[in-house]
Amino acid sequence: MLYREAGQYKTNYAADMAIFPLREDRVGIAIIILAAYSLAFLGNSFLLQAVMIPFLVFSLAAIGLNILTGYTGLLSLGTGAFMGVGAYACYKLMTAFPGVNVIVWIFASGFFSAAVGALFGLPSLRIKGFYLAVATLAAQFFLQWCFIRIPWLVNYNVSGALDAPLRTLFGVPVVGATATPQTRYLVVLTIVILLTWIASNLVHGRIGRAWIAIRDMDLAAELMGIRPLQTKLLAFAVSSYYCGVAGALLVFLWYGGAEYDVFNINQSFFILFMVIIGGLGSLIGSFFGAALIFIMPIVLGIVLPAMLSPFGLSVGADVIEHLRFMIVGALIIFFLIVEPHGLARLWQIGKQKLLVWPFPY
Amino acid sequence: MSTAVRTQTPSEPATGEIVLAVNNIEVIYDHVILVLKGVSLNVPRGGIVALLGANGAGKTTTLKAISNLLRAERGEVTKGSIEFAGERVDRLSPNELVRRGCIQVLEGRHCFGHLTIEENLLTGAFTRRDGNAAIKRDLEAIYEYFPRLKQRRGSMAGYTSGGEQQMCAIGRAMMSRPTMILLDEPSMGLAPQIVEEIFEIVRKLNSTEGVSLLLAEQNTNMALKYATYGYILETGRVVMDGPAQMLRKNEDVKEFYLGVSEGDRKSFRNVKSYKRRKRWLA
């Protein structure tokens, strides 16, 4: 009864094609954004630092990979490396030009990642499917080798690690040891909302249609006049841009410093699983996937001991850890069996059912 | 109009025992999209029954509901029952149905492209347990029916023509020794000559092997020529059924499906035709 299409008339095509055509959707998204901002003032620093900031960072990386794998149908295992390029580029820019605002450099670092991504996307015109995944694996290994072997990237720092120098925004520390989780959360949230909004406009527009056409049937897309190489490279570039910004956020606004092995192949798989479980070809799915893979283990880690203690079972932290792994694994399989197309599809079916409720169809 | 036709003729084919009975099934896709709104039909043993209708009328959905392939496409039979050879089969898996003798030939052929024609035919005998000699015999029998397949037996199915692939798909289904074949749109994308050739072979299979056929077709003219009985579907409902001969003579069928009308051309501006169309759909 609350979610109704009836009575909302559209008088032009633009209104019909809007991303949130229903008033209920617009109200819903406004409430979510408001809640996300108020969380900065209501949540404690553990919630912000250990849950929300990484969740948003991973969501952004998942959106990046989703543009490539979900929308354009190009399988990539180089996500971790592209995130690394963003992080290292941001570090070099921040230290080379300390006077410029750090937010500018976070956005700029994505362009370096985009260029590298487009370069490694070149084989995608000829290679498809799993073979392309193997080709992008080359990016993963080569870039990680660069992070280790080129000391210039870390300004000849003997530890070989990236550290976050103090940087401020309007006089408030944003990057560095003195930046509060609250400030960092607000910055990350704003960047993620902005980039999600841009991504949503991209995938719903002309470019997005070209990507989806390439994914669904590349031959037909070519016959429609879509240039496959340019479209695929653009997907690689945009995807890597998002991953690069996510990488910069990960190091400077979450970890506060990192070494090369943050951007290893495991990170690539981690993001890929988020995209698959969240739903290929769905922006909201990227958030769902990040929530399921990242937040659920944390919640289980808190809930499990609390659930076991009333029965007089005092279990060690290691047992909890093992249980957590097993339950997360089981839940991932469960969700994929219930909905092979990811959580986003579940969400979509739920919305469709709500539209016709209380009737079954 | 449909009720009028039904009163003129017995609503089920008169001859013989019913091998497949579909009773008032309702199909919903994706939990929210209603596709079939109560479809009932009967196929007599040894009969050819045509299921006719425009695109999106629900022909393929009906066939998939019978062969239990809907689950793979997020569909579900929510009401009604399907009986094959006197037993409820709505909850069976597709492979169990093949073991019981009901097999579907999918729309668009779906031959295994990297297997040869002969290997494709042999996959049809997958469920059989009566030994290699019997399978060999049947393979020869299939080649008798489809001489073209014998010529191409060594070629990869992916490299054969559309007509040969359709023959291969039908032959492959025959290799499971079915009592009933659900044939979905065998004429799709084929030259009229080839369509006729295939329909002739299908008729021969029906008369000599005694296999019953439920045939979903767009090509109303062709289907009614070979079928004994026909059902016409329109947006998920059976709007008319009757013996093929009768349907061929029916004025509405002639005008809406066979493209012939009495005398002058009809257009939507023609009020009489428009009214009849509305009554037809109601």
Image (cartoon, rainbow, N blue to C red):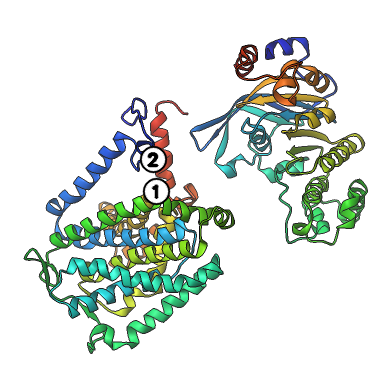
In this orientation, does residue B150 appear?
Answer: yes
Name the residue rendered at 24%, 87% in the picture. A159
Which image quarter is the N terminus of chain B in? Answer: top right
Name the residue rendered at 73%, 13% in the picture. B6
Horizontally, is A201 left or right of B227 in the view?
Answer: left
Camera-nearest residue between B100 and B153: B153
Q: Dot 2 surroundings within 10 Å: few (below 14), some, or many (20 or more)? A: few
Residue A17: image tag: 2
In the picture as drawn, the residue positioned furthest to the left comes out as A171
Q: Amino acid at mark 1?
A: His
Q: Secondary structure at mark 1?
A: helix
Which image quarter is the C terminus of chain B in? Answer: top right
In this orientation, does residue A314 appear?
Answer: no
x%, y% of residue A122? 48, 72
Residue A240: image tag: none
x%, y% of residue A276? 44, 57
